Structure formats: C-alpha cells, structure tokens
Amino acid sequence: MDLASTVDGLMDGLTADLVRLAEIPSIAFPGYPKDQVERAHDLLVELLRDAGVEHIERLELPDTSPVIYAEVPPPTPDAPTVLLYGHYDVQPPGDESLWHSPPFEPTPVEGGLRARGIADDKSNVIAHLGVLRAYDGRPPTGLKIVLEGQEEYGSAFDDYPPTDPDRFACDAMVIADMGNLRPGTPTLTTGLRGVCEVVVEVRTLAEARHSGEYGGAAPDALLALLQALASLHDAKGDVAVAGLRREEWTGASYTEEEFRELATVQDGVPLIGTGSLGERLWSGPAVTVIGLDAPDVDGAASAVVPYARAKLNLRAHPLQDPDEATAALVRHLREHRPFGIELTVTPSDAGPGFEPATGGPAYRAARAALREGWGTEAESAASGGSIPLVNGLAKAVPGAEVLLFGAQDSMCGLHAPNERVLFSELRGAVIAEAAFLREYARSFAAAREAK
C-alpha cells in the first residue's frame, strides 16, 4: 500500500469530519453545557463505527465526562496491540474579542483551519480515524482506542487505568496529544515536566494603617511577599531553589528567534535564565507567579498593606519526584522569612513528570514512520506541559513503550486565541501513525521468526 497516496485520498473526508467535530463546543469545565460534550462523544462513536470499529464502550466515572473505549482485534494471535489515545474536550475560548473569527466556527487560514480545540486535540482524534480508514478498519496490529472527554479540566480518569490494567494492556501506546517542534519537523516528545502549585500568604497587621504615620516600621505584608518571591531566582533569572533538579538538554529545541515569537516577547526585552533553551524549558525547573492578591493601583490608599498572597506554579524535571520538588520549594519559602516575618506556604497536589524509554522496537518503528510521514528525520524534544493520564497508563501497563507525537505543532496556538491546525501536519500525522502500525507489526514478526 502506498500510504501517502491513500491518505491524500482521505484528506477531504477527514477535513470535513474535523470541521464537524470542531464546530461542537465540547468544553468539560464546570458551568458549560454538558450536552455539547455528549454531542462530540456521539459523533465520534458514529465515526468509529463508520470506520469499521465494532467493539465500542462508554466508560462512566464519577464527575467525569464519558470516555470512549474501543477495540479492534489483532489480525493474528501473535500480532502486537497498540493503544491510541486522544481527547475530544477543549479549553474554553477565553476572551472571544481576541479571536479573528468565532472560536467554534472553523475558518480557513493559510494552509489550515482555525477554531478552539481544532489542534488540541481534535486533529489528533481525527488522525486516529484516518488511520482506521487507511486500513479499511483492518490495521496490521490490534488497537485499543481511548478518547477522553475531560482531559483539559482533569477528572477521575487520570487515576483509573491502574485499577483496570487488563483493559489497557498493550505493547505500545501512541499518546496523540502532542505535535511537532515546528511545522514540517517530525518530533517525538521524550519528556514532560512535573507540576504543582503553591500558595504563599503573609499577614502582618490586623488592618491597613496610614503609610505616613506607620510606614517605615510597621511590617508591610506586600513588601515581605515581594522579598520572598524575589528570592526564588538569582540575578540572571535562574531558579535559585536548592533541591530542584536541572540537567543539560541534548535534544532539539527552538531558536531564540522562534521562541521570542512564540512567547510574544516584546522587542528589546531579554529572555531570563542561562543555559540552552531546552534546559530552561524542559530539563530544568521553572517557578512562575501566576496570581497575586494585592491592592489595586487605581484604587490604592496611602496605607501599609496588612495582607498579601501569591500563587506559584512549579514545573520540575521530568524524572524528579514531584513531592520532592514541591517540598524543596516549600522549604525555601518557609526558611526565607523576609524581615523576620513568617510566611504561610500551602502546596497543592503535585503531578509527576514523565520520561519514556526510547530504545525499544516501538521507538525504532516510530522514527522510521515519522520520517515517512514528513519526509525528514525525526527530532526529540520535550514539553513543559503535563498529561496526567500518561503516568496512569504507564503504571497500568509498565512494559508498554510510550510514544508521544501528533498533528499539533508548537506554533498552533493551543489554549490561546486563534488556535489553528495545518493540513500538512494532519496529513503527516495520519501517514506516520499508519506507517508506525505497519513497521511495528513487521518488527514483531521479524523478532518472532528470529527465535
């Protein structure tokens, strides 16, 4: 089979179905209509059946949108089984005035389509369907297809796989909630940073007091908090918290020009930190102040601030124990005591990072498949984001190789206004995933014959 020609013949239909799916505002956050998530669920069940999938289940868990679970039996008893993952829920659109077109009206852009969730992760869900269609519903491996309905908000499904390991048993997994470093550069994600959030509070006075009468001796809660926050980084912008793991990054990364554009860094503003971008973004820690409670500038009174609070987001090395990383940050803050003032530091639950093994037959097959999909050698990169379910799946099936790739790219604007997907990346992902199943099945057969 000429996969490229086969997929080219499928692209119009896949694009039409992507539009149908992206038109549905399947937001699984509280306060949004649940019936829209159900609409997306029902459409995907219909598309899976049309693609030849007979075994489809609906998994119901507490306070969790339905998970689609489907199976395609292996063509022979000794063929491998591959789990394909994606999610059909999306982020809220945010401020719709920042969108160039309505977020749930898929709109043509140069080389692709714009809509909320069209890249993250509906393009990858459609890529799975494309693979089924390319093989007329009879792929060269067995398949277990998992399409989650509440990934963006988080749900009980994150911790479910280890409680039902037989359901998820497989030889390899394709976690299609990722994409390429840049369009046209096939990329395997080989690391996900861990994450936690910490709230820091300072209370120094029973109530605000006149800054002229009391300022200079009365302990200012906001000044104390700012001192504590400033201690988290050194003069060059590197994280200065003892006990957080940082290593050299040896994979691919952005150029500084690409990163400045992606991060929308203003002209003349330097990047912070030292070392390679990969080290700063993926194999080292990051501490970000994501929220600050303090008096408004416009309504500020001339008073010593009695109370201040900040919320911090910590991203840790993929292999560092998340509780260990959280403890290091909490310890740093509690020991700092700016002006001798004690801080109240409250951590949230920590999410682990992930770093898959990359030397097995599935990885070798994936590299060949990605080259076939995009016509050039695959790169290895990492992500500062996290996918909690990956760890749950890895615990459920510890012997399975985990592959992270897909139709997104780092410039697609996921979670931002004007998210888009490129047809070239969708096409490449379908070809690559289909080629991976073929190559992986062949490697299994060759290993069997060699015994």
Image (tube, helix red, strand yellow):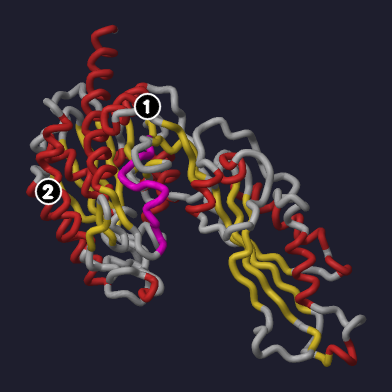
Query: Would you say 144 lies left or right of 253 here?
Result: left
Residue depicted at x 36% and y 55%: 157
Q: Determine the main secondary structure of the stretch shown in magenta.
A: loop
Q: Residue at x 21, y 26 (%)?
A: 438
Amino acid, disc 2? Asp
Q: Position of residue 93 (x, y in %)?
A: 36, 69
Looking at the picture, how far across and down is residue 450, in whole percent? 28, 7
Element under label 1? loop
Question: Are the residues tagged 1 and 2 within 8 Å (C-beta)?
Answer: no
Which of 352 and 99 lies nearest the eye of the viewer?
Answer: 99
Instruction: Report the magenta residues as a range.
Output: 403-416
Disc 2 crowd rating (10 Å Cα; few below 14, some 14-19, many 20+) is few
Q: Is residue 52 left or right of residue 270?
A: left
At horizontal 24% and vertical 9% (from top left) the residue drawn is: 449
Residue labelled with disc 2: 12
The image's mark for residue 377 is: 1
Q: Residue furthest right?
A: 217
Give percent across and percent down for residue 51. Answer: 10, 45
Q: Residues within 10 Å of mark 1 (few under 14, many from 20)?
A: some
